[in-house]
């Protein structure tokens, strides 16, 4: 997994060279069970934080679906395990799960109906000193598709 990230003048430069602005993030995923970034650093002064996930691969959402879910680090495992027992229709998340702080729809590649999805939230929903992760709730993906979400 790529993990080299450099924080420079408020911009996050991912290991693949992609520059992510500190309020607006675009994450490209493909037919692998990986995000291109291991860490996201958002600015606490953002009015809203916007995250878009785009699937550039060829595999259908039913086979290699990905989404972006934000939760407290301590809640990730339970959300993922309980979500696994739901369905693609609910994006493999328990409906109305309060532990899910933000989430996108599940996206897929190829002829999938949804190849790109977004979510927006206010940084004010995050508590200072708490640890947050982002992950993919597709069954079996959360172990490798997971990273740190940091508010600065
Ligand atoms: Co996934």
Image (cartoon, rainbow, N blue to C red):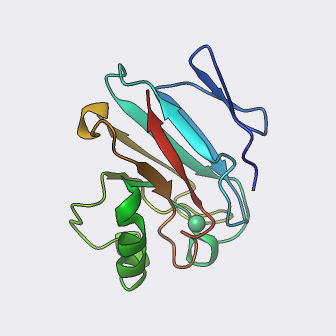
> In the figure, residue 92 lies in which quadrant?
bottom left
Q: Is residue 45 above or below residue 132?
A: above
Image position, residue 63 (x, y; %): 62, 78
Ligand 1, image quadrant it occupies: bottom right
Compare residues 46 and 30 and report the one nearer the observer: 46
Query: Is residue 119 visible to us here?
Result: yes
- Residue at image point 67% right, 66% down: 33
Q: What quarter of the picture does the C terminus occupy?
A: top left
Horizontal side of 128 relative to 22 (left or right) equals left
In the displayed orientation, state which residue is furthest to the right.
Answer: 16
In the displayed orientation, state which residue is furthest to the top.
Answer: 9
- Residue at image point 48% right, 63% down: 106
> In the figure, residue 1 lies in which quadrant?
bottom right
Compare residues 5 and 67 and report the one nearer the observer: 5
Query: Is residue 92 visible to us here?
Result: no
In the displayed orientation, state which residue is furthest to the front.
Answer: 129
Horizontal side of 81 relative to 97 (left or right) equals right
In the displayed orientation, state which residue is furthest to the bottom.
Answer: 85
- Residue at image point 68% right, 60% down: 34
Image position, residue 112 (x, y; %): 59, 66
Q: Is residue 54 above or below residue 46?
A: below
Image position, residue 142 (x, y; %): 54, 69
Q: Is residue 99 above or below residue 5?
A: below
Q: How many marks?
A: 0
> In the figure, residue 125 lies in which quadrant?
top left
Horizontal side of 68 relative to 46 (left or right) equals right
Image position, residue 75 (x, y; %): 35, 64
Horizontal side of 138 relative to 16 (left or right) equals left
């Amino acid at each position: 997994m790529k993990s080299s990230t450099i924080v420079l003048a408020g911009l996050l430069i991912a290991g693949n060279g992609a520059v992510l602005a500190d309020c607006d993030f675009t994450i490209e995923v493909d037919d692998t069970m990986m995000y291109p970034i291991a860490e996201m650093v958002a600015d606490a002064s953002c009015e809203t934080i916007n995250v878009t996930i785009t699937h550039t691969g060829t595999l259908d959402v039913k086979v290699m679906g990905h989404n972006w879910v934000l939760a407290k680090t301590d809640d990730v495992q339970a959300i993922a395990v309980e979500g696994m027992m739901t369905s693609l229709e609910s994006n493999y998340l328990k409906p109305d799960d309060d532990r899910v702080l933000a989430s996108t729809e599940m996206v897929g590649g190829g002829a999938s109906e949804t190849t790109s999805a977004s979510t927006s939230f206010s940084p004010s929903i995050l508590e200072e000193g708490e640890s947050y992760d982002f992950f993919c709730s597709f069954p079996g993906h959360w172990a490798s598709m997971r990273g740190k979400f940091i508010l600065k």
